Amino acid sequence: MTNTDQGAARRAPFESARGKLGFGCMRLPANDDKTVDLKTFAEMVDAFLDGGLTYFDTARPYHSGNSEPAVAAALAARHDRSEFLLADKLSSGNFERREDIRPLIEDQLRTCGVEHFDYYLMHSQGPGNYDKYQRCGAYDEALAARDAGLVRHVGFSFHSDAAFLDRILADHPDMEFVQLQVNYLDWESGVIQSRACCEVAAAHGKPVIVMEPVKGGMLVNLPDEAREVLAAAGGGSPASFALRFAASLPGVEMVLSGMGTPDMVAENVRTFSPLVPLSGEERAAVERVAQILRGRDAVECTACRYCVDGCPKKINIPELFSCLNAKRAYNEDSAKYYYRTTHTGNGHGLASECVGCGACERACPQHLPIRELLREVAAEFEAGAKE
């Protein structure tokens, strides 16, 4: 790529994208042994591309390290490079010093089976890791990789408040885009601050990629009361309402959906073929659903699993929170599921076995008080859980 070509690419980072739906490769179909079901994934890739969409997003930690090789096998090895766009990330656990970064990018390219990434992101930026990226010159190394042709566009994904986002964009005005958690439940959240972060991105002139538009499935698996509100507004699946909300926002260029089944791909492709913005009545409906969900005291966990790897007791935190949400939001008897999750020889600890080290909370993009919530899980289930 010539310097002229690079300059043109930098001016329009999403010009070559077709459609606003991106395929998030974080929650892929899995075999019984937790490896990626490559046959099903390949079918999903084909359906996504056949739907006229092109954007795929991966990262080295995704799917316990199996996402990048799966992308190579199901996407890169089976389709011409001109048919798709690929994003990857620089994750804090994969480097310790500046000298590690270029070799890591080169290894990620080999693992994904491509010669360049269309988008490369500093991963999950926030107060807990930003100093490391600064100390190691990570942003400059990513820009140098762009200048070398290994990367076409550089940006970052973000999990903190609007003031910290403003700081990063002031420190690094050469970032081309930001990836933010945006959905109608978090739009007015004082913790996630979706609206405020979008406003900061707009003030800096940065386009937005949306992650967690359905909040890890929370906006898909709705209680009956919330489903009735959406049905009265004109129908459409809960997922379609959430995706359309995010995709309709000013400044949003791409909406990622972590798709795990062929049916999810088919439904999401239909939602974007063509994309129809929410009407005023539909916007009011999703605001009402948000009120309903906030009133049910559900744990707003997106099942990203960042908390699990560092847990010394191997507590399957997202699954335990799912049990608690089933009890609170849906009034389901989830005690048996809790028992099976923690007592079937799978190596995962009980909620009561938490040692309070706080590693989970430091890793949590949702800033949840996980230690406190695990005490609530233990109180709810461990006194009388039975097979």
Image (tube, helix red, strand yellow):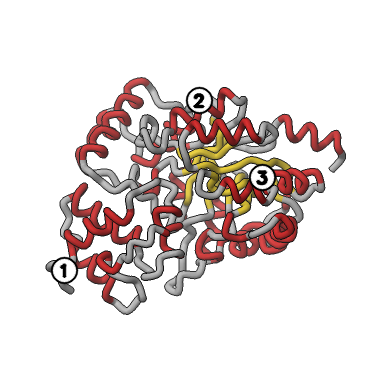
Amino acid tagged 3 = Tyr
Whether residue 49 is visible to the viewer of this picture, yes or no, is no
Residue at horizontal 26 percent and vertical 75 percent from the top: 343
Residue named by callout 1 = 385
Quarter of the picture containing the N terminus is: top right
Task: Give percent across and percent down for residue 101.
Answer: 70, 56
**Tag count:** 3
Amino acid tagged 2 = Glu
Q: Are marks 1 and 3 in contact (CB under 8 Å)?
A: no
Residue toward you, 214 or 97:
97
Amino acid tagged 1 = Ala
Residue toward you, 81 or 156:
156
Return the disc, 2 or 3, that comes first in the chain's sequence: 3
Q: Quadrant of residue 316?
A: bottom left
Per the model, the C-alpha gap separating discs 1 and 2 is 46 Å
Q: Is residue 185 left or right of residue 275?
A: left
Say the numbered circle drawn on residue 156.
none
Return the disc, 1 or 2, that comes first in the chain's sequence: 2
Say the numbered circle drawn on residue 119.
3
Up the image or down, 177 lies above or below 150; here it is: above
Element assignment for label 2: helix
Residue at horizontal 44 percent and vertical 33 percent from the top: 194
Residue named by callout 2 = 199
Q: Within 10 angstroms of label 2, few (less than 14), some, or many (20 or more) residues? A: some
Task: Give percent across and percent down for residue 283.
Answer: 35, 25
Whether residue 317 is visible to the viewer of this picture, yes or no, is yes
Residue at horizontal 39 percent and vertical 37 percent from the top: 242
Task: Give percent across and percent down for residue 344.
Answer: 29, 77
